[in-house]
Image (cartoon, rainbow, N blue to C red):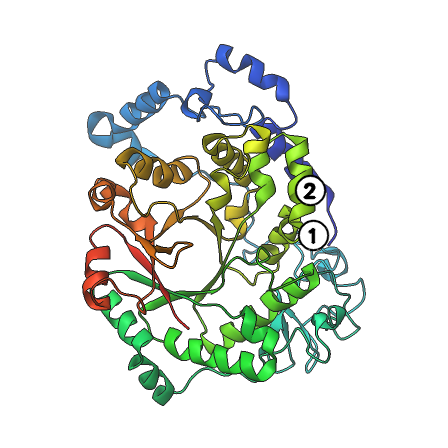
Amino acid sequence: MRLTLRRAVAAGSMLALVGAVAPAAAAHAQDDPRSCRDLLGADTPAYVQCHWLATPEEALGVALFWGADDNAKLKEATPYPGRFIDCSAPGSSCPAPPDGGAEGDENSPLPEDAEEGGTPECETGGQECAVGGYEAGGDGTAAGPETGTGAPRTATGQTGQTAQTARTGQSAQEGQAVTPPTAAEIAAAAQTPGGQAVTAARTTGLRVWLDTELADDWKAGPAAFDAAVKRVGALAARPEVAGIRFSTQLGYDTTFTTHEEVAAFVAAASAALRRAAPGKQLGVHTVVPEFACGAVEACRTEMAKKYPLLAPERIESYLSAGGVDQITLDGGLLRGGYTAWKIDAKTARRNQSIQLRARAWDVLAQVAAEETGLVGDVSAQEVADRIATPLRDGAAQQVNVWTRLQDGQGGAERLTAWDALKRLSPLQRRMAAVYDPATPETDPAADLKKLAEVFGQVYLTTA
């Protein structure tokens, strides 16, 4: 896509506004009477600047000016005349854009990737093309998202296969046979244990996500994968379900060995689920170990070597491709995973927050944090810190909390800090419980009712 001069100037202006091209401005922030940097967090990077367009005192003056004498000045005000021409008015002359506006800038009626003199994608009947990140046929039906691996387009706009998707004969477009479930299939799914848990959760007012794992089914082949997607789609088709998290520990466990394989799975799963459960949000759970290293180069080098599939640019490619609406980052490594470099949990969490804000991943997808360490004997202060810190630092829009954790001896630790969680009631909508109805404490209905006292959302584990 071309970068026009207009966009280049706009980008430069934006960077100048936040201070990225003028780092020296940070040194003078305290002397600037219009600086509002004191409102930013102590860990805010120096290149981020804040300036009042109108100080609180000036804003008050403006409000008093327009509100005086029963809003007299506001009632007398007239719209600003502007600089627009009514082309339909007699005597007006509005020249047409040169060459029909095919140059490809913001004001052009044609997309920027249309070749001069050629036909832009999706404007020729029957031609396959790209629509919103999805491959579409001439009938306008979506046929699956791009994998984000840079596969070249053919002359018809199709993408080539991605390294045979790491499995012989299976393309990144698999799952095309999956269709939305029928009314009978949806009704049958509602009678399953998972369906009954969805009903119970919704009755309590909890916002419901399905938490499932499709990676093993995808690895098992098209038949197993399509069956799993169809099963999940029938359960997710109900209006009570807001979204589907279709993979956990993506790239961290040993399911996949190459980035191409992970990318092909994400593309196939998101494409199939968008057909089987249209309108539902899709999410994945993973971790980005390098984020917590901060500026410690030895830490970053070691993490990149140890977790090659979890490099920031790899994870970001799944978000940029449009197949994922929500990404959840696990906080397990933050506690003790960086002691070799004298990075404690608090510093690791702060480093991760800075990286997330700097990369603006929240623009590409909703970012959530996941806490597995609040089960068992945990202090009220620790509960508050682990839940509130990611939200306060702008590193996450919600925090997911495990309600039960299996230990190494076959036992289980359970969530017990109910009083501490109740004190966080202002954050209730941003707090989600990860709950498996197959291992209830009492029974799913009673458990979910209790969870609804402190959580606003629930991730129901389903097979």
**Residue that mark 2 sits on:** 6
Q: Which mark is residue 429?
A: none
- Asked if disc 2 and disc 1 are in contact, CB closer than 8 Å, the reply is yes
Residue 133 on image: x %, y %: 61, 65
Task: Name the residue at 46% across, 82% down.
Answer: 180
Pointer 2 local density, CA inside 10 Å: few below 14, some 14–19, many at least 20: few
Q: Amino acid at mark 2?
A: Arg
**Relative vertical location of residue 92 with respect to residue 55 in this rendering, above or below:** below
Residue 165 on image: x %, y %: 70, 71
Residue 378 on image: x %, y %: 30, 40
Q: Is residue 50 visible?
A: yes
**Relative vertical location of residue 197 with respect to residue 27 in this rendering, above or below:** below
**Residue that mark 1 sits on:** 105
Pointer 1 local density, CA inside 10 Å: few below 14, some 14–19, many at least 20: some
Q: Amino acid at mark 1?
A: Asp
Quadrant placement of the N terminus: bottom right
Left or right: 59, with 363 as reference point: left
Kind of element beneath mark 2 = helix
